[in-house]
Image (tube, helix red, strand yellow):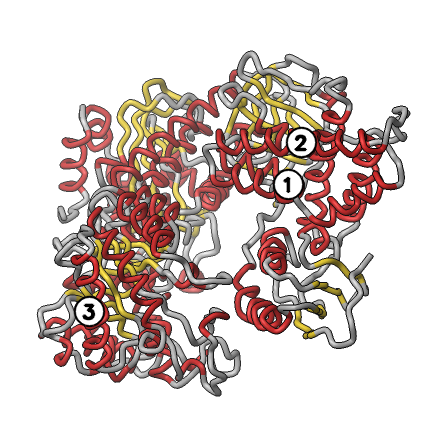
Amino acid sequence: MRIIAVTACPTGIAHTYMAAARLEAVAKNFGHEIKVETQGAMGIENKLTDSDIRQAQVAIFAVDIEIEGRERFNGVTIIQVPLQEALKNPEGIFRKLQH
Amino acid sequence: MSPDLSSTALQFVFNCPLSAGMHARPASHFAKLANSLVSECTLTNLRNHREGNAKSVLSIISLDIREGDRCLVQISGADEQFGYTMIHDFAEQVLPSCDVPLAKSSPTKPGFLPRILQRAEAKCYSGSAASPGVGRGKVVFLNAVSLPQAAISHHRSDPQEERERLQRALRNVRENIREELARSGSEAGRDVLQAELALIDDVVFAQKLAEHISEEKSAAQSVLETGKFFADLLRHSGSEYIRERAADVEEISAQLLAETADGNLPQAATALQEPSVVVAETLAPQQFLALDRHFLKGVVLEYSGANSHALILARSYGVPAVVGIKHTKSILSSGQDVVLDANRGLLFAELAPDVDRFYAREERTRLRQKTILQASASTPAITRDGVRLEVGANASANDEVVLALENGADGIGLFRTEMLFMNGRPPSEEEQLAIYEQVVKSAHGKPVIIRTFDLGGDKAAPYLEPAAEENPFLGLRGVRLYAKHRDLLQVQLRAILRASAFGRIQIMIPMVSAREDVLAFKEHLKQAQEALRAENIAFSKDVPIGIMLEVPAAAFHLAPFGTEADFFSIGTNDLAQYFFAADRGNPNVSRLSNPSNPSFIRFLNHIIEEARASGKWVGVCGDMASHAKYVPLFLGLGLDEISLPIENIPKIKGIVRRLSASACRSLVDQIHSSHDASEVNDLLASAEQTCSSCPLVSEELMILDSDSSSKEEAMQEFIDVLYNSGRTADPQKLEDALWAREYVYSTGLGFGFATPHCKTDAINASSIVVLKLSEPIDWGSVDGVGVRMVIGIAMRATQNGDNHMQVFSVLARKLMIEDFRTRLLETPNSPELMQYLTQELKLTLT
């Protein structure tokens, strides 16, 4: 499965990047392809392009704050979870995708 | 009872310039001058029309003179003309500088309670912190000194006998205070006792006593009525400071009362037997002094202003004190164990293990901090690339010199002597020698630059008979006065030269504008040296002579001084004032005299290049040197020394150590192409980041044997580590920022790791702190596992963002990798951990 994701936390110092790393690692275990955009203290990094978005089957938003450029994802299936979920139980998020 | 002044009395009106009103110190100055006259001298407050004898401190302070009050001085008698000049000059020129900032009672801010104490379930009362520190001990109640309400039913004996009884009492109390004075080891203690002595000898106090005695009252009754009269008068003053003096009057009166009763009234002395916290409604100064300070661990007062003598003493002896806790008799009992936190204004009325542990850990932190500060105070200030900047102190008295050395001064860059000359008469050679000798001895081999008297301008001495000048700052000041007052200069130079036999003295000449000034000065010096030689009096043969650079004409071209001067020191205040043709004291133009102006900085640069070309040492001793923001500029300009007020020395030395001199030189290049002062200030503000490199990871930020046993304690330790390493000056704000993040959701990320973090301007340099905990602690982590390692991230909030963010994001990602976590937990010591983190986070070692 081709998955895209966005992570964003209140201070943008730590959890944004932890969640991104977690999602990347667990997706690999599940055999998915994933690209994670981080919206943290350094601004948007690893930005999802229009073509990334078009090709993705699902988008995971692990965010605690409103993200920038939500309109880019119009028409994409979005699963939004609190960021902590990506740290606590990332496997759970991916299992949800398979249903 | 005011003296009858004939209509010919000389008089003038002045406005009280003192923000604290006419309090004891200026009043005693005033009274001292008035007492040197045979003329009568009165002072009238034109606001409330109270009139008093200007020879009495008590009388002056009871006039309730507040800032801005118009005051009338009248002088009448044989030496009225001299008196008029002297007191007029005092009121105009000296009085404004008598305004010492008074301590303010500062109620403890709510919400200041550290989380650990908030959680502790111990009975706690809060008041105002009045003298910092933490103490624990048993409650000892003391009763306030008070005068009996009712008249004393002493039968009156013979009036002559009563008069003698009173004299005897005055003598005994005076003697007791003198003995106490001789024993007292602290400056503040002596000041307080001197003030009490002055009270006993006060002419108006004596007058009032004499009046009562002559009305055939008993000695005791006279004392009681006099004491009550003045205490009431002072208690109704508009100034808190003066109201506090009422307690002093009562204490002295109570002592006199005890003495007049022929020892029948027992002295209520309480001997402390064990570590104690003394609790009282109020405390009189001698009551405080009588307490055994070995056992005195704290003081709690129900009522007291921040400037009561008891609190001034508590501060000077380092005894913790809290005021404003009411109803102490009902909330505490004698002998009960208490903990007094006079930093936060708290009294814990029971011992709780949490509270004890908190203070024990805080004490440990304080000791660590002290060790670090002391270690850094005594070492020179050297930049990261090895350039030394001497950091000296400005001083004008011996106790300041002692304090300067304790605070790590590399010498005394400016010892001012004008104040010695601003009393009624010039100081003698012996008086000056005593001071200079003490000062060089206190400096312990470090250099002391003594500036010869710099009078004129805004500083005058009546005996100099200053000519009326339209522009005193452009008139006879500093060295320009010396031709007219050769004798004064000879006396001072002899005293300085004699003191040079005891240590390293250098002499600095103020207000030099041309080479002739220096040549003439050296003639004076030669004369003093020859005279001493002829008298066989020892002095050092090579006392360096320096020039204070404050006149642009002199500062612009230093080569002519090359052979005559050994060093230069830039007085930035006057130099800027003359350079910009703008009076710093004139609010309409003071903004023009801004040392951040790029043209002034070019001028400084020019001066320093000139000094370099002649191979001479050059320093800065003006106000500019005391501002932390200019440190990168001074390093970039290549100064040898800066000299500044004592309290800023440790901080400035710390900044020098963080900076790189070569980066500062590039900064100066940028400054040279700035257009205005605000551009310069912006560049200077960014210098802390661009020119300093405080490493993100450092061994001093790692504690691998942390005994923190709760999240609160670990957070506190995280903050303490940053505080101890000088990375935050505002631990309270840092704590608030960390907990604000923590309340969103726990930073316990699972796997036994927690990453508390925040971004705040309370942090000077972004930092990663590592705490390895001896026992796992609950952090509310996502997986419920106890935390064994805390990786704290403190990020500096700046406008331009932080170039360390990249590192933090790498760290956050790596923490998700098991191998990385295992290595962190298993690395046994900080050097190895330091190396591992540096390599993993791709940090460059500095």
The verdict on a common chain for dots 2 and 1 is yes
Residue B150 relative to residue B56: left or right: right
Q: Tag 2: residue type?
A: Leu
Q: Are marks 2 and 1 in contact (CB under 8 Å)?
A: yes
Find residue B294 and report its horizontal and vertical position in percent: 49, 20
Mark 2 vs 3, N-terminal side: 2
The verdict on a common chain for dots 2 and 3 is yes
Question: In the rendered structure, the residue with mark 3 lies on which chain?
Answer: B
Determine the secondary structure under disc 3.
helix
Q: Which residue is mark 2?
A: B283
Q: Nearer the viewer, mark 3 or mark 1?
A: 1
Residues B444 and B531: in front is B531
Residue visible at 24% across and 62% down? B507
Question: In the rendered structure, the residue with mark 2 lies on which chain?
Answer: B
Find residue B181 and report its horizontal and vertical position in percent: 52, 34
Residue visible at 66% across and 72% down? B14
Q: Residues within 10 Å of mark 3 (few under 14, many from 20)?
A: many
Determine the secondary structure under disc 2.
loop
Marks 2/1: CA–CA distance: 9 Å
Question: In the rendered structure, the residue with mark 1 lies on which chain?
Answer: B
Residue visible at 52% across and 18% down? B295
Indicate which disc residue B637 carries.
3
Residue A38 relative to residue B20: left or right: left
